[in-house]
Amino acid sequence: MSYDIIGVRAQFPALTAGIAHFDGPGGTQTPEPVIQAITDALAHPLSNRGREVAGERNADTIVIETRRAMADLLGADPSGIVFGRSATQFAYDFSRALAKTWEPGDEVVVTRLDHDSNIRPWIQAAEQVGATVRWADFDPATGELAVEDIRAVLSERTRLVAVTAASNLIGTRPPIAEISRAVHEAGALLYVDGVHYTAHSLVDVEQLGADFFTCSPYKFLGPHHGVLAARPELLETVRPDKLLPSADAVPERFELGTLPYEFLAGTRAAVDFLADLDTGATGTRRERLASAFAALHAHEETLRAQLDKGLSELARITVHSRAADRTPTLLLTFEDRGTTDAYRFLAERDVHATAGSFYALEASRRLGLGDTGGLRVGLAPYNDSADVDRLLEGLADFLRA
Ligand SMILES: Cc1ncc(COP(=O)(O)O)c(C=O)c1O
């Protein structure tokens, strides 16, 4: 297993601007092969999907190949890969579609750890049909969301549980496979927000037991759109609102309007780029992705250790990311200085770590950080040890200033 960080960085044109990016959880920078794939899609004939003329075939092939690529990335069935605008859009679309079968008195579970995109759509859909919303809480001291926290709010009326596979605010990775067993024992469906998780962990939707799993390629080096994975048989049972002439087959039934073919081409290239991250790996794309995520994990762990050590040497900083299982995403606050000031101070030094609650409003409030949140430091595949040094020096200067 080997990770060539110099070779990786050389493929990101944006890095030549000299910025140390710690804003990966908000959106990653884009490698050359992804940019090239988007350009190529647009530089060749491109029409609506079909098989008669080159433009139709190109669009069709992009869709088919990108479903295969995303299926490899997520351990899913290509026929259950749905493309859309964003993870937020999917939560709205699926909550509305699934709520058609809910009745007054049915229950939906949301968690305080989640991004608002996996909370509010479910609350609003529940309200519209008179279903009850039950909240699963996490422990603000540890940042952990345990299976017991979910079990505590399950009942025989639970229809669906919406939970994150990783918090975009503090990195916590709840035990989704255990949660899935509890949710399924209760006879409910599990809707998993994998947007932050997919950037750091090799997803296996079967092993996680997610009935629905969403992610957004722009968090893992791809373009700005969303992807949902589910078993095709389950998708067959869901009836979204749709246009009369549009395809009723799965998964097209859920893909409203014309797909962004050039972005899908970019997403396929992003998956291939990830699969090549372990330069020594061979085998199928799924096998290479497994090696790549192991190599990425080792790289991130080295940087995280450097970060943790550096932060522990700085006084007056609180690190709110504490769960035993978490991504390399740290939320920081300072004893006597504002996090927005830190964000601006670092930005002036070309170090980009954003301050906020990042739409994880409930989690931020539960942590006692109100709507302000903290300074978020997230690692991405192109970060190196020099980036971490620059961040630590910037924070040290900020705390001295
Ligand atoms: C954990 C998590 N869920 C959902 C979202 C929303 O994703 P999208 O922009 O695709 O709607 C984000 C975006 O930051 C996120 O971090």
Image: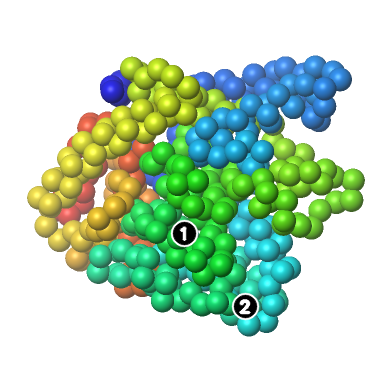
Amino acid under label 1? Ser
Q: Nearer the viewer, residue 251 or 4?
A: 251
Q: Position of residue 114 (x, y in %)?
A: 45, 62
For mark 1, does the 10 Å Cα neighbourhood hold few (<14), some (14 to 19), or many (20 or more) residues? many
Q: Nearer the viewer, residue 322 or 207?
A: 207
Q: CA distance from mark 2 to mark 1?
A: 19 Å
Q: Position of residue 266 (x, y in %)?
A: 58, 29
For mark 2, does the 10 Å Cα neighbourhood hold few (<14), some (14 to 19), or many (20 or more) residues? many
Which residue reaches farthest right? Answer: 245
The residue depicted at 33 percent of the width and 17 percent of the height is 280
Residue bearing the label numbered 1: 180
The residue depicted at 30 percent of the width and 70 percent of the height is 139
Q: Name the side, left or right, on which 220 lies relative to 10.
A: right
Amino acid under label 2? Asp
Query: Which of the numbered marks, if any, corresponds to residue 106?
Result: 2
Q: Report whether residue 225 is seen.
A: no
The vertical placement of 153 against 5, above or below, is below
* Residue 58 found in image quarter: top right
Query: Which of the numbered marks, if any, corresponds to residue 59?
Result: none
Q: Position of residue 48 (x, y in %)?
A: 81, 30
Q: Report whether residue 100 is seen.
A: yes
The residue depicted at 73 percent of the width and 44 percent of the height is 250
Q: Nearer the viewer, residue 22 or 203?
A: 203
Q: Position of residue 15 (x, y in %)?
A: 39, 28
Q: Secondary structure at mark 2?
A: loop
The residue depicted at 63 percent of the width and 41 percent of the height is 81
